[in-house]
Image (spheres, grey):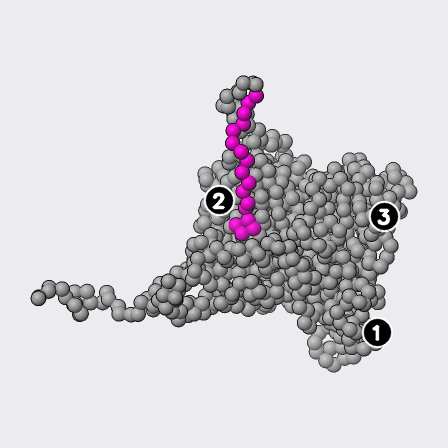
Amino acid sequence: MKTKTEIGYDSRIEGDVICTRLDAALNWFRKNSLWPMPMGLACCAIELMGTGASRYDISRFGAEVMRFSPRQSDVMIVAGTVTYKMALVVKRIYDQMAEPKYVIAMGACASTGGMYRSYSVLQGIDHLLPVDVYVAGCPPRPEALLDALMRLQRKVAKEPVIATLKKVA
Amino acid sequence: MAETRDIQFRDVAGQAAEAAQALAPANDAGEVELQGEKMVLNMGPSHPATHGVLRIVLELDGEIITKAVPEVGYLHRGDEKIAENMTYTQFIPYTDRLDYLAPLANNVAYALAVEKLLGIDKELTPRCRFIRVICVELARISSHLLGVGCYAMDVGAMTVFLHTFTEREKIHNLCESLSGARFTTSYTRIGGLSRDMPPGWMEACRQFLKEVVVNIDETETLLTRNRIFVDRTQGVGVISREDAIDYGLSGPNLRGSGVEHDLRKAQPYLVYDQLDFEVPVGSTGDSYDRYLVRIEEMRQSVRIVHQCLDKMPGGPINVADGKVVLPPKDRVLTRMEELIHHFLNVTQGINVPPGQIYFGHENPKGELGFYINSRGGGTPYRLKIRSPSFVNLSILQRLLPGHMMSDTVAILGSFDFVMGECDR
Amino acid sequence: MRAQQLAQQLKARFGDLLSEPAEFRGELTMQVVDPEKIADICRMAKEELKFDYLVDITSIDNYGEDPRFSVVYHLYGYEHRAYLRLQLSVSEETCQVPTVTTVWKTADWHEREIYDMMGIRFAGHPDLRRILMWEGYPHHPLRKDFPVTGKSTSVPGIAFTEAAPLAGGPFITVAGGKDAMAREPRGRLPETDSTESKGPSQQPLSTGH
């Protein structure tokens, strides 16, 4: 039986086709559109705004879409001091985010409690949430946050997507 | 001074109730039924318009707010308790993080308070005073730029935010070359400053002032006669003069209501009595007036910084008292007396006399006051921070009822508060 | 001086209820002898002496003294531009002061904060709830017998706390301590009896030098 379907190389569509693994392709989509949930709690939130604003321009890394709705976001940037009063609120917002989700602990307070060793401050958001990247600084410079974002992108790029999907099913 | 006139509080809820009564059919008993039930809406603590972690529980009748209960404390970090556990100098970095939009102004306010307690506020060197004034006014410009930018973003104009942040980054650069940190500066020390201005800083500052004036003009072009902006802010959130005083408002929120009170004029500190500037005052006390006051204050700040740069005297930046300010390092390493001063100053802190003082400072957000109760020694017995945002927010429960739900964003933005300072 | 005159007018009106104004660094402080009269004094100061701006209310815990608490009022007048400080003492047993929300609305949140942080109640306050900590939090953090690191608490579903680790700081040196641990305690310990303190050889920081 003879078919007219062409398989393999086609010179008419040369240059528009890439051969890759599905995992790599999905991860490539994912890592370049990490939409942040800006959990702006304190001083770091201003540097987070600075990162999003004109000079540092976080949209170069595909993360300019600050979503205040947890259901539309991929990475929660915990920027600022997490107090005990706020802790369960942060946790609740994190729980509402859809998988896959990531957390960046921005600044000393979110990472360890920082300079606030006091009765009302949670000593690091990692008591409640799994943190992917910690950023040092009080507050970190925008460059440091961008570096954290790039590190997270590298992490996302290595994740097995298909394997996890099968496991869930 | 602008003429102040009495204004009628816009009673939207009353109008709406009247309208509803006119429409609603009377029942058999002749009573008018008001339709619908109240809805409770929780706004915050994670909400883009609450500028941080303010939470407001709103009770709504349709779209009209009937009751508003602000909840603060989501960023209560225990600054006052921490202050009791460290020396006066060690607390300076914590003041950065009070009003984190204007760290330099907080540094200056705190240093002036401790100096008042020490009784050395008259001995500050002229150069130190002028540099401190520049710091405060740069912080004011920076804070108001962010305030106006975010306000515009809240009511729907994204461009302004990106626009003002460009200038803020320039102030950050100036801060960085001045203090070493672009954001949390910790620039002042008790009795002086951590370092002098670097070479070329004054020229950079003058250059910045030239640019920021253009930026303020452009911001005004974008907003002041913008139909959408004016419609959303004019007549919204009107605070009468009496209410403003009764609720203890301060800063642009007070002046927007027509009270001409500015601590730089009323209780001149540093060198404000030698400088020529004006205090802008609003006439109606609505959100639009508060915005106008902020814009004008930025212009006045530019004037002040210009005058300070022109008048900048030479000489030392620290008071000559080794018991207060750390002596120069080369003398510490070679002389006994300076070594002892250095050691005591670092380990025990500055020996402060017993007593209590209150110092109020005109911060960008309003009156930032430090009440220090000392029983002698290197640590405060009680340090109370009178934060403007905390007091300013307390009027919300009075102000919000009667407004539309969407006006909440316009009112909150016009208050330009910071939760770090509100909750401390 | 204007503030001095105003203070004397207040003193003339209330007589023995107020102490002679004491001056320190150009500020006047008057002790209110009877806390129950504070609202009357404030109303008179506001209405007749034009102290129309209540700057601040705060409280101090004089731990180990009787009466234990002080409440401090800062008054300011826009016209005469003078500050005045009123101070009163409350014992731990009473722990109650009349509210001044009837005089200035701004007192509302200040008094709630004092109630939250220090545990002093304000009689007649319209809405005396915690403001900075959450409802159900059992302690009053600014009392001197409460450690800066906090104590562990739990209100299920609302909030929880744990004592913060204080490894290494903050450092304070006390002159004249007998050994290194006494000279450099790790932070000021809560000023209670030694059974509650954690470190074996740490002494409460003496406040006078």
Give the amino acid at mark 2: Val
- Residue B148, above or below A115: above
Q: Secondary structure at mark 3?
A: strand
User: Which span is picked out in magenta?
Assistant: B31-47
Q: Is residue B265 located in the magenta-colored stretch of the structure?
A: no
Task: Report whether residue C146 is seen.
Answer: yes
Q: Secondary structure at mark 2?
A: loop
Q: Given the image, what chain letter belongs to the residue carrying mark 2?
A: B
- Residue B347, above or below C35: below
Q: Secondary structure at mark 1?
A: loop
Image point (55%, 49%), residue name:
B44
Give the amino acid at mark 1: Gly
Task: Report whether residue C85 is seen.
Answer: no
- Residue B344, above or below B416: below
Q: Residue C55: image x %, image y %?
A: 72, 46
Q: Which residue is mark 1?
A: C176
Q: Residue A125: image x %, image y %?
A: 56, 63
Q: Which residue is mark 2?
A: B155
Q: Which quadrant of the view contains residue C122?
A: top right
C76 relative to B72 in the view: left or right: right
Image point (68%, 49%), residue name:
C130
Q: Which quadrant of the view contains residue C176?
A: bottom right
* Magenta stretch secondary structure, dominant: loop
Give the amino acid at mark 3: Gln
Q: Are marks 1 and 3 in contact (CB under 8 Å)?
A: no
Front position in the image: A124 or C31: A124
Q: Which residue is mark 3?
A: C31
Task: Measure the C-alpha gap from mark 2 to mark 1.
Answer: 61 Å
Q: Residue B316: image x %, image y %?
A: 70, 67
Q: Residue C128: image x %, image y %?
A: 71, 44
